């Protein structure tokens, strides 16, 4: 049996977030580290930069991630986010 699979979704809404330590790069590093420790294969990374979590219509990265979960043929089991606030407000 192979590893379970995940996709990563990361988002920042302002420069302030990058300064406070949850830049896109930091979010991805922490999520990849978690996946590595738990033997979960990351198959794709999606991102939205500079967008609010309160509205979905402009969040192409999130829509693509959700479509991947629903329609992807690679049996992804997890959508990994750094904090729930990165997904929605």
Image (spheres, helix red, strand yellow):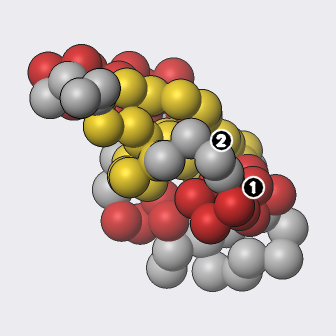
For the residue pair 6 and 50, the one nearer the viewer reads as 6
Quadrant of the rendering where the N terminus is positioned: top left
Percent coordinates x, y for residue 5 in the rendering: 39, 37
For the residue pair 75 and 8, the one nearer the viewer reads as 75
Q: Please tell me whether residue 64 is drawn above or below residue 5 in the rendered image.
A: below
Query: Which residue is painted at 49% across and 47% down in the image?
Result: 75
Q: CA distance from mark 2 to mark 1?
A: 7 Å
Query: Which residue is painted at 66% across and 51% down in the image?
Result: 72
In terms of secondary structure, where does tag 1 sit? Answer: helix
Residue 84 picture quarter: bottom left
Q: For mark 1, does the 10 Å Cα neighbourhood hold few (<14), some (14 to 19), or many (20 or more) residues?
A: some
Task: In the rendered structure, find residue 28 and report the number of the disc placed on it.
Answer: none
For the residue pair 54 and 6, the one nearer the viewer reads as 6
Q: Please tell me whether residue 7 is drawn above or below residue 42 in the rendered image.
A: below
For the residue pair 17 and 32, the one nearer the viewer reads as 32
Query: Which residue is painted at 30% across and 37% down in the image?
Result: 4
Q: Are marks 2 and 1 in contact (CB under 8 Å)?
A: yes
Q: Which residue is mark 2?
A: 46
Percent coordinates x, y for residue 41 in the rendering: 37, 26
Q: For mark 2, does the 10 Å Cα neighbourhood hold few (<14), some (14 to 19), or many (20 or more) residues?
A: some
Q: Please tell me whether residue 86 is drawn above or below residue 33 in the rendered image.
A: below
Q: Which residue is mark 1?
A: 64
Q: Please tell me whether residue 30 is drawn above or below residue 87 in the rendered image.
A: above
Percent coordinates x, y for residue 60 in the rendering: 82, 57
Q: Is residue 20 visible?
A: no
Residue 55 picture quarter: bottom right
Please give left or right for residue 62 compared with residue 30 in the image.
right
Farthest front residue in view: 1
């Amino acid at each position: 049996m192979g590893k379970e699979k995940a996709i990563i979704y990361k988002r920042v809404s302002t420069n302030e977030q990058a300064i406070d330590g949850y830049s896109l790069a930091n979010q991805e590093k922490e999520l990849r580290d978690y996946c590595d420790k738990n033997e979960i294969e990351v198959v794709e990374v999606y991102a939205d930069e500079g967008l609010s979590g309160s509205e979905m219509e402009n969040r192409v990265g999130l829509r693509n991630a959700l479509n991947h979960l629903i329609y992807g043929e690679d049996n992804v089991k997890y959508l990994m986010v750094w904090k729930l606030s990165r997904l929605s407000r």
